[in-house]
């Protein structure tokens, strides 16, 4: 949506919808993928960047687990 010139409010609404569907990591993941796009030549291909995505989800899971541990 960012690359297809959607209106900012449309992009924001889509992100909010994804968050409501429990894809709470979407804003941060979009930010990470934008970083890949800016430095794509550094990585060569998406496969080379994929370990960063795996680390992102591992870190996100840890932070979510800490958040839920408070509820115990």
Image (cartoon, rainbow, N blue to C red):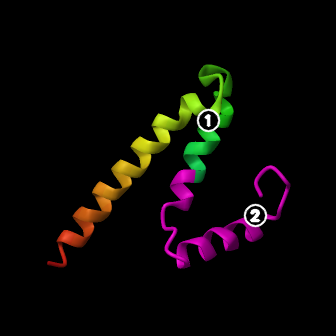
Instruction: Identify the secondary structure beneath mark 2.
Output: helix
Does 18 sit left or right of 70 as displayed? right
Residue where numbered disc 2 is placed? 8
* Percent position of residue 23, x then y: 52, 68
Relative to residue 35, is residue 69 depicted above or below?
below
Disc on res. 36: 1
Query: In front: mark 2 or mark 1?
Result: 1
Residue extending farthest left:
72
Is residue 34 in the magenta section?
Answer: no
Instruction: Identify the secondary structure beneath mark 1.
Output: helix
Does 2 sit left or right of 5 as displayed? left
User: Residue drawn at (61%, 44%), measured in percent from left and top?
Assistant: 33
Residue extending farthest right:
5
Relative to residue 39, is residue 7 depicted above or below?
below
Does 40 sit left or right of 24 as displayed? right
* Percent position of residue 44, x then y: 65, 22
Residue numbers of the magenta segment: 1-29
Q: Residues within 10 Å of mark 1 (few under 14, many from 20)?
A: some
Residue extending farthest front:
47
- Ranked by sequence position, the earlier of labels 2 and 1 is 2
Q: In which quarter of the image is the N terminus?
A: bottom right
Front residue of 3/53: it is: 53
Front residue of 68/11: it is: 68
User: Residue drawn at (34%, 49%), measured in percent from left and top?
Assistant: 59
* Percent position of residue 66, x then y: 23, 63
* Percent position of residue 62, x then y: 28, 55
Q: Distance between the residues labelled 2 and 1?
A: 21 Å
Q: Quadrant of the C terminus?
A: bottom left
Q: How crowded is mark 2: few (under 14 residues within 10 Å), some or many (20 or more)?
A: few
């Amino acid at each position: 949506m960012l690359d297809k010139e959607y209106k900012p409010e449309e992009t924001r609404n889509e992100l909010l919808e994804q968050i409501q569907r429990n894809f709470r990591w979407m804003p941060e993941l979009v930010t990470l993928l934008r970083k890949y796009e800016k430095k794509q030549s550094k990585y060569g291909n998406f496969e080379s960047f994929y370990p960063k995505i795996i680390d992102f989800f591992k870190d996100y899971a840890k932070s979510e687990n800490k958040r839920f541990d408070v509820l115990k």
